[in-house]
Amino acid sequence: MVGLMDYLFNSFLCVLAKQDTVGARRALEKYKDLDPTFPVQRECKLCETILEACENLDVDSFTTAVAEFDAMTPLDPFRTHLLLQAKKMIEDASGGEQLL
């Protein structure tokens, strides 16, 4: 069964995968208001960390945050695909060629 937190997490990843950090920031703030439990969830913490990494073009922080999350809660192929799209934004902007 998919809950609200899953929808919010997936929605955030979709916005970020479109390489829209401004939209992702707005969405994240909106989602925190929609669900008062969302800000304390691991998924929200990951969203905050990877959004900051994207804004700062910090591929290492992005990769570390995703790896740590995935070690505790394995990411499904859909979420992995979206995260790779977001990471590509950092690599394209910084000229890096690292892998997730």
Image: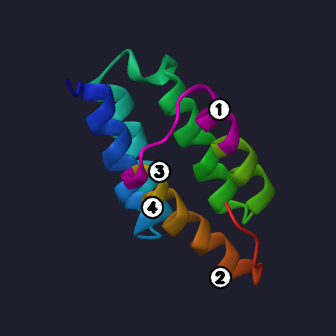
For the C terminus, the quadrant is bottom right
Question: Crowdedness of circle 4 by 10 Å Cα count: few (<14), some, many (20+)?
Answer: some
Quickly name the residue at label 2.
92
- Does residue 89 lie above or below 46 as drawn? below
Asked if the magenta segment contains residue 73, the reply would be yes
Q: Which mark is residue 81?
A: 4
The reply to whether discs 1 and 2 touch (Cβ–Cβ < 8 Å) is no
Asked if the magenta segment contains residue 94, the reply would be no
- Does residue 70 lie above or below 82 as drawn? above
Quickly name the residue at label 3.
25
**Could you tell me which secondary element the residue under label 3 belongs to?**
helix
Residue range of the region highlighted in magenta in the rendering: 67-78
Which is nearer the N-term, disc 3 or disc 4? Answer: 3
Q: Nearer the viewer, mark 3 or mark 4?
A: 4
On the picture, is 49 further left or further right than 47?
A: right
Question: Crowdedness of circle 1 by 10 Å Cα count: few (<14), some, many (20+)?
Answer: few
Quickly name the residue at label 1.
71
